[in-house]
Image (cartoon, grey):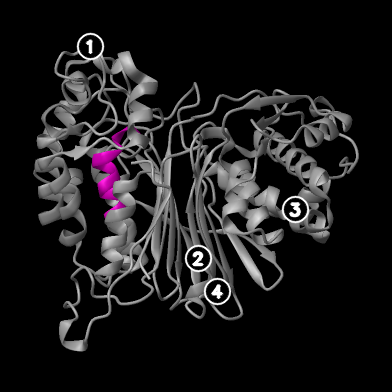
Amino acid sequence: MAIASIAIALGACGPSDRPPEGTIGFVEGFLGGVVADEPHAALAGRDALSAGGSAADAAVAAYFTLAVTMPSAASLGGGGVCLVYDPESEQVETLDFIARAPSRVPATATRPTAIPGNPRGFFALHAKYGRLPWAQLVAPAEEKARFGVPVSRAFARDLAEVGAALLVEPKTRQLFGRADGRSVLSEGEVFAQIELAAVLSQIRRQGPGELYAGSLTHRFIDETLAAGGSLSPEDLRNYTPIWRDSLRVPWGNHAVHFATPPGAAGTVAAQMWSVLVEDDRYEDAGPVERLHLLSEAAMRAFADRGVWLRSDGTSALPATDLLAEERLRRMMASYRSDRHTPAGSLDPAPAPTLENPSGTSFVAVDPDGAAVACTLTMNNLFGIGRFAGSTGILLAAAPGPAGRGPTSLGPALAINEATGIFYMAAAASGGGTVPTSLVNVLAGAMIAELPMDEAVGAKRVHHGGDPDIVFHELGMAEDILAALRGRGHQLAPTPALGRVNIVYCGRGLPSNPESCAMRADLPPRGYGLAASAD
């Protein structure tokens, strides 16, 4: 499915013709929307909204569908981070359910595995903010797993990227390979996951406790160990999602919120955004300086990340210290609007860091202005590339070296705190480019006030600190590139930088739903879907 967005109009119904609450079609008019990297997930979330569900309900439905249709990044074995806005309490929170390291790795483990976070994470989200029955939200994913679902273009890209490696293991070859065992499935081919459907059935009926401390637990652990993984009953029983405060950046009448560590990309994006809005730097700059500023801010934020980021993705400093005015002032002290500052001259200088490029994201917004923005990862594309036997659960890699971990997680939300009105929800995937691609789009949509198609479609830049290179997307105008070189930047072209999913309501929600625009990134960046109905 290569469609970038879809709008489904509901015909007018008389009061007696209106479907009952909890049934698709219950909500008439604007129902919000879901934007995701994978189209089946966006449609599942849209259906939950149409039935009268909340943004949290839509997020749960979208996630469990992703677990079936894009297990490369969102299996039940993985984890992630969500930002959640509740208009009743006018509170923004970070929900941390990353796939954490096991308490110990046995000598028999050939591919250490993480503790699954997704099932309990989305159960916690539903318990606090859900309206529809849990079973109703899990059932569509169970049905897709049992009866099969066509491979979307988004998932086909992941399959093609790993390719032959998936054909080495018997289980992955059976599920993701063609009948001849010589190649992986391609777009449009149907694949079913009968064993996963059985597990989803238990989770639907009994909740995720069945996996963590119930009838599935010992089988899941035994099958994980047999696959060369690492997991214990204590790891599962003690796993708890964590609700945290967000990183808050004031901006005019609004506040833009980012995820706290271990969603490290959230902090990098928050620092970049803080720098851009300070003294209207970005707003007052011309087209070339805006790209220059984005690059210089990113370089400094990634350099600073080397100071506070621990190997497990957590911060060595309190979250509030990371956005302190004095810290940001020191970061930008050497900034020149007309000249690139060599990365090696920064103190500290940025260090080379391997990033986890694997992940996926989605956002959901309901008519009341509640919003959820999530980023998910298996800590490696397809995790360890092995299943926990007869459970059908693809196992996530344990956090560790070579970029495996939660550093690329970090969604964003914007709220007018005086009125409690929602304005923006966005999330991105794409490894180290997550914070820069996210801020590229937010700056275009919210500061430059570009139409959404232009803000999302504009060519992006990225500077990760080391190497000292500005990566830019193919097709950027030659006069712009020449001007950046004139400022001292070394440039390198790349086909795409990140995948961004965004909902932006320029005049606020729920007061002005007609001002809402929803977009998923277009090829070559992504193959997602923005699903809404109005």
Q: Nearer the viewer, mark 4 or mark 3?
A: 4
Q: Decide: marks 2, 1 in contact (CB < 8 A)?
A: no
Residue drawn at 55 percent across, 74 percent down: 508
Q: Which is in the foreground here, disc 2 or disc 1?
A: 1
Residue 358 on the magenta span: no
- Residue at 51 percent of width and 38 percent of height: 408
Question: Quarter of the image containing the N terminus?
Answer: top left
Q: Residues within 10 Å of mark 3 (few under 14, many from 20)?
A: many
Q: Which residue is mark 1?
A: 182
Q: Quadrant of the C terminus?
A: bottom left
CA–CA distance in space, label 2 to label 3: 22 Å
- Given this view, does label 1 or label 4 mark the residue nearer the observer? 1
Nearer mark to the viewer, of 2 and 3: 3
Name which of mark 1 and mark 4 comes first in the sequence.
1
The answer to whether 516 appears left or right of 129 in the picture is: right
Query: Of callouts 2 and 4, which one flags the residue occurring earlier in the amino acid sequence?
Result: 2
Image: 246 above or below 269? below
Specify the amino acid type for callout 2. Answer: Val
Q: Are marks 4 and 3 in contact (CB under 8 Å)?
A: no
Q: Earlier in the sequence, mark 4 or mark 3?
A: 3
Q: Residue at x 19, y 28 (%)?
A: 388
Residue designated by label 3: 276
- Look at mark 4 in the image and give the residue it sits on: 508
Across and down, in percent, residue 277 comes to: 75, 58
The nearer-to-camera label among 1 and 3 is 1
- Disc 1 versus disc 4: distance between alpha carbons? 52 Å
Q: Residue at x 68, y 73 (%)?
A: 253
The answer to whether the residue labelled 1 contacts the one labelled 3, judged by CB atoms less than 8 Å apart, is: no
Residue pointed to by mark 2: 92
Q: Where does the magenta region start and end? A: 61-72
